[in-house]
Amino acid sequence: MIEPGIHQGFILAAYLLAAVVLIGMVVWIVLDGRSQRARLAELEARGVRRRSAGKAGS
């Protein structure tokens, strides 16, 4: 087995920081996706459509 060495604390801290950042980004993306879907549903309820929806031939 590999011995921990003097840098074990720094390595563990780096892995933990990377994990926290990745988890934070995933949470942010999920929450932003929910927000965007809610905004899109609101626009669709008001009758707003995409500008490109009317250009079927172009």
Image: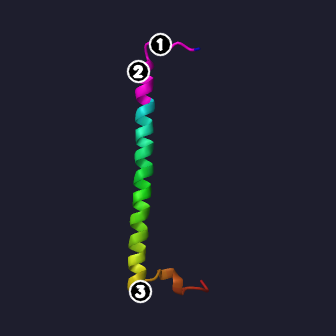
Q: Label 3: how many residues lie within 10 Å, few (<14), some (14-19) or many (20+)?
A: few
Q: What x and y, as percent, mark residue 24?
A: 40, 46
- In the picture of the structure, the residue carrying the numbered disc 2 is 9
Where the N terminus falls, by quadrant? top right
Q: What x and y, as percent, mark residue 55?
A: 55, 85
Q: Looking at the image, which residue is at 43% across and 44% down?
A: 23
User: Is 32 inside the magenta-drawn segment?
Assistant: no
Would you place residue 48 above or below residue 9 in this image? below
- In the picture of the structure, the residue carrying the numbered disc 3 is 47
Q: Amino acid at mark 3?
A: Gly
Q: Amino acid at mark 2?
A: Gly
Q: Which residues are magenta?
A: 2-14
User: Is 8 inside the magenta-drawn segment?
Assistant: yes
Q: Looking at the image, which residue is at 49% across and 15% down?
A: 4
Q: Looking at the image, which residue is at 40% across and 71% down?
A: 38
Q: Does residue 4 appear to the left or right of 56 in the view shown?
A: left
Q: Label 1: how many residues lie within 10 Å, few (<14), some (14-19) or many (20+)?
A: few
Q: Do the residues under discs 3 and 1 have CB atoms within 8 angstroms?
A: no
**Tag of residue 5:** 1
Where the C terminus falls, by quadrant? bottom right
Tell me which label, 3 or 1, sits earlier in the chain.
1
**Tag of residue 55:** none
Would you place residue 50 above or below residue 15 in this image? below
Q: Amino acid at mark 1?
A: Gly
Would you place residue 1 above or below residue 55 in this image? above
Dot 2: what SS? helix
